[in-house]
Image: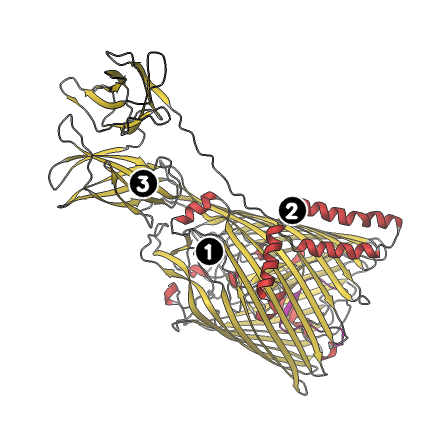
Amino acid sequence: MKTPLLLGAIALSVLPAYAQQNSISPDSVRTIMLQEVAIKTKAHSHQKHLQEFYYANKAATTEELMSRMPEVSFIRRGSYGMEPTIRAFSAGQVSVTLDGMRIQGACTDKMDPATIYIEPLNLQSIEVHTAGGSAMQGAAIGGSLNMKLAEADLSDERRLSGSVSSGFQSAANAMLGSLRLNYATPTWGLRASGTYRKSQNYRNGNGEKVLYSQYEKANYALNGKLLLQPDLVLKADLIFDDGWNIGFPALPMDVGLAKARIGAISLVRENNKKRWRRLETRLYANQVAHYMDDSARPDLPIRMDMPGLSQTAGMFAEGTTSTRSNQQLTLRADASASYLSASMTMYQDGQSPMYMLTWPDNRQLQSGIAAQYNLQAGEKTQLQLNSRVNVSDYAVTTREGRDQLSVFGYTGTQRQFVIPSVSLQASHTVYKKLKALVSAGFNGRTPTASELYGFYLFSQFDGFDYLGNTNLKPEQSIQSEFTLSWQEPRVRVQATAYTSRVQNYIVGTFDPSLSAMTAGAHGVKVYENTPYALLAGAEASVVYNITGYTQLVSILKYNYGRNTNGEPLPMMPPLRNVTSLRKYFGDNLWVQGETEITAAQNRNSERFREQPTEGFMLWHLRAGYQQETEKKVWQLNTGIENIFDVLYREHLDWGQIARPGRNMFLQVSMGF
Amino acid sequence: MLQALVTVHLQAQKAIRMSIKSCVKSLYLIISPYFKGLKKRVPMKKNIWLTLWALSLITLFTTGCNSDDETPTPTIAYQKIAEGTADGTDIKVEVYSTEELTTGYNPIYIALFDATGKRIEQATVSFKPLMDMGTMKHASPIENPTSNQAQDGYFPGAVVFTMPSGDMGSWILDVQVQANGKTGTLTAPVTIKEPATSRLKSLVSATDGTRYYIALLQPQKPKIGINDMEVAMYKRNSMMDFPAVTNLTIALEPEMPTMGHGSPNNVNPTHSGNGHYKGKVNFTMTGLWYLNLTLNDATGEAGKLYFEVNF
């Protein structure tokens, strides 16, 4: 912490300067570093500027942070509990893991992706792999999102360190308090952290309160690290996350309680002199309980409770070896078992309760082996091969569950899927500082539990009840990506274009023969494989070091999607640009101005009753100040988001609910 | 190649579905030497390799088990509702049912014993229920035991009581027995209750004015999923004659009245003998359901009715 620059640079994108023979790393990964790392550098690298761009609001939640990455968008149903999408691929199509561990949300309405059970304080970094690079994490067609857990520090002398921070955001009267403690010795370390957030109903750009947009949560994490041998580390993680009174203004229900219990034990050996430079094995288990109800909503003829439970246990082993100095091979084997169960009970005065399983009790076993091979072929060319074979087995485990599904003639509920995936990526320095990267591959994903077994799951998005289909085929995708980047000492410009063709695209298809269960629903849709869908898009970014103390970061993204009939796909983020200009005044103070411009989205999906969305432009102003005393580091972050109090909503927001208006935030932290 | 890989995967998944507990246990066993090793400061190079191999092997194992729940086949619990000696014989007659007698279709089981107390296995048994309402009397539909051989010691039949006992009148059940060359009758007073949800309906045909009685036999224990559906149809020829009806067609439409929705893939009950019609009814959730039935005879729609099922 001696350096004023908190976020040390870890060069995960291959900058020529870092292209040493032993560190071949993939280009198709984007990382947000959240904890200071050991490398002490004052170098204003491009990577670091992006880091500061992502982490501009230190009071942000994990999902707010990720939404600043160009690849990531969020489907929003409330202020909290948003569903991450990568390049418009939805939650079921991307693999979301916590340090390689699988966590299954327990909500049938996708209101609890794994990202909500993690605080930025728990994390060391967030990695987003697009398409092909996700093979190491899981079988997915839309890429992967892996959140690396923060670890305890070790130190040569026994030492207690930590930080305390508190924050406030005005739009929602939101409070944040967090505490981190680390006890370090030469052979072991212990890290404990806690975060508490309470957010009220926020005000939108019209000054109106948005009802049911509040939330409250507490997160506790414990990490222990023990040096068994100089190069062998035993780690243990324990995370408790409780969220309650989480409102979803775009839905007819809220979440009374959402709690996750996450535990892991792992052994890591890192030794560059050994044949296997890095070996890691991990054993983990987690449980998520999620309770939805409508008790906060007024005047409903029927009251409804929807509890869900998910339990997962798994393991993985991963090893990296460099047989020669210009090659690197990483092998991974993983396996996990998940159990899901969710039910719905409706209550009406004077009637017996109406009960059903919305996720008939089911389990999914999955195992996979994956390999990543990197080759530095000459001075200018790098190759990376990613591959994976994933085998999964789904089944409904109870008679009640099978009886329920038999209503639709689904007799065989057990399914097995084999998903092979291969992708090849080549990068080549074409001309001086111009580098081209081409990647192509195919991969697939299994249907989700909702798509296989879902039982009258109401979607507020299009107003239909959704039914699973046990006969679904897996989605398969062929994809390609092309990136050009130009790297000068002071400028880095990068542009990416990508396209995916998804075969057997899974989508709910209206079945007029079925009657809707939910009062007011338009009908019933059954998940079906459609011939194909096409998703494409482009991203561009500029990082420009105008002077040593002034930097410009600008990102641009566009997504396009259409189905077999040429109709637009729903939930497509429109053209969007975020530009930020940061100026340092000395080493202690910086000020950053930011604009966010989003075009209108008129390619809306009629089939999903999706509405077009208007474009908008937002202005933000942020500033940070840091003061070091002998033993302490004080930090002050403040800013105004949406300065002009614009009334707006994003295209991926459900239910025509406006986003927060002007928001002033203030965050103070003290590190020791 | 791929097939081989898949087989390996599946074998791994299937063969070793260890519980999490045993995994943790084994992990402890593997790790514990290190703690000892730390104390002694002994390098444990070989152990590490063994450990890592063991751990990577464990990673292939998936926990989990198929908790297939097996329900035991229920045994029939006979309840004795009457007993006595058939008039003019020494045959002891015992009358059983499986549940309390209610308005609607009631299976009745008769056990017969001779003077020595030995079970009679061969007999002809018939029922004659009678409602005495003071000013008038009437019978009700019956199903006499079809065989003169006892099944597991009992002669099974059924009586469809058309109203409950009470102030309006009381029921008696005559059981006529013909066995060992003798014929006699046991007259047993029986009490008929009205069930919580009605299991018997009647309607007057819109086509020819016939009065029909429709009894719901199944589902007895409704569940979410596919349920057997069975009704029995009778008509009133006279106050003492209620024969089975075999020539109707039935359309079934379940409905949840509070929610206003139905359920898919139901099978209309069709005649399967003796006035019984069998089909399938699907429930997608618990709660109150209406089983809407539309009856048609050869000339057209005879009428509509519904049964309530609440579970």
**Are callouts 1 and 3 both on one chain?**
no
User: Residue B144, relative to residue A150: is it above or below?
Assistant: above
- Few, some or many residues within 10 Å of mark 3 (<14, 14–19, 20+): many
Where residue A387 sits: x, y (%)?
A: 62, 69
What sort of colour scheme is used for the picture?
A: secondary structure
Residue depicted at 72% across the width and 83% down the height: A378
Q: Mark 3 = which residue? A: B229
Q: Please tell me which residue lies in front, A224 or A552.
A: A224
Percent across and percent down for residue B166 are 24, 20
Q: Main secondary structure of the magenta part?
A: loop
Q: Residues within 10 Å of mark 1 (few under 14, many from 20)?
A: many
Give the left or right position of residue B105, taking residue A223 as reference: left
Label 2 close to label 3 by CB (< 8 Å): no
Is label 1 or label 3 in front?
A: 3
Q: Which region of the structure is painted magenta?
A: A20-37
Quadrant location of the N terminus of chain B? bottom right
Q: Callout 2, which amino acid?
A: Ile
Marks 2 and 3, the one that precedes in the sequence? 2
Q: Residue furthest front?
A: B181
Q: Amino acid at mark 1?
A: Leu
Discs 2 and 1 lie in a common subunit: no
- Label 1 sits on residue: A452
Determine which of the numbered discs, if any, sits on residue B20 in the image.
2
Instruction: Point out residue B261 in the picture as x, y percentages from the top left corner.
Output: 32, 48
Q: Residues within 10 Å of mark 2 (few under 14, many from 20)?
A: some
The percent position of residue B83, horizontal first and vertical second, equals: 32, 15
- State the SS at label 3: strand
Q: Residue furthest bottom?
A: A431
Q: Quadrant of residue B184?
A: top left
